[in-house]
Image (cartoon, rainbow, N blue to C red):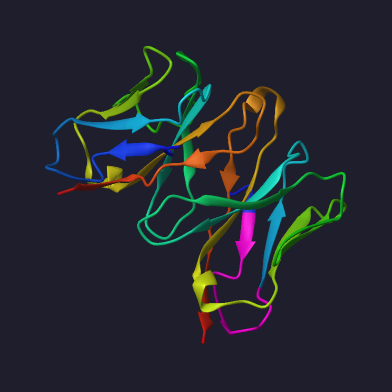
Amino acid sequence: QQQVKQSPQSLIVQKGGIPIINCAYENTAFDYFPWYQQFPGKGPALLIAIRPDVSEKKEGRFTISFNKSAKQFSLHIMDSQPGDSATYFCAANAGGTSYGKLTFGQGTILTVHP
Amino acid sequence: GAGVSQSPRYKVAKRGQDVALRCDPISGHVSLFWYQQALGQGPEFLTYFQNEAQLDKSGLPSDRFFAERPEGSVSTLKIQRTQQEDSAVYLCASSPQGSNTQYFGPGTRLTVL
């Protein structure tokens, strides 16, 4: 059962555009929502993370928007650059007895054209 | 400081062979996770260690999969009698005590012929 659904599967934008990637979850016990960036041949690297007590978090050009009632969260990349071309994964963790086990979305392949 | 390292980076096995994949976590990290990433998919949880104790192995797909971390540092994921469906990238991640942040290694790409 897919507990975190991510869309779109792929996304193409021009340099300077603002790609938006969306995720939805079912498990209301989730309380930590990170986004990871993965380049080919590399492991995922943490970009930014949010907890459900805030509706938005910004770090540099990356912003997470969180809607607890809708059980949805999204990643916005401001002023996107060709170097941002990578696969992005949302994830969620329930904390407590789940020991930080992450449940990942299916991933979004982002291409930023120069 | 060094990040999480994994070896080998690539492994080709014939169906039925046993394989062992190694993970060296960041020094001092208490938590260690193994994930399996199929082509074009997100990582899926396999197992979790806190120090040397394996606290969750609910994601291991079958009894052919076995993981250990005997001294609370290096971990080994062993797959016995490999099958073609075991072909995937196996990722290791570690995390310091009290933190949600998981630091991933580069993964081992396993191909079973």
Residue that appears at 63% across and 27% down: A98
Residue A6: % across, % down: 62, 61
**Where B77 falls versus A51 (above or below)?**
above
Q: For this view, does A44 lie left or right of residue A20? A: left
**Magenta span:** A5-19
Residue at figure coordinates x 61%, y 23% from the top left: B97
Between B53 and B103, which is closer to the camera in this rendering?
B103
Which one is in front, A62 or B108?
A62
A14 vs B111: above or below: below
- Where is residue A100, by image quadrant? top right
Q: Is residue B7 left or right of residue B56?
A: left
Furthest residue toward front: B1
Residue at (38, 18) in percent of width and height: B69
Residue B55 is situated, as x and y percent measured from the top left of the image, at 52, 17
Residue A33, above or below B68:
below
From this viewpoint, is residue A1 visible? no
Residue A60 on the magenta span: no
Give the quarter of the image for residue A74: bottom right
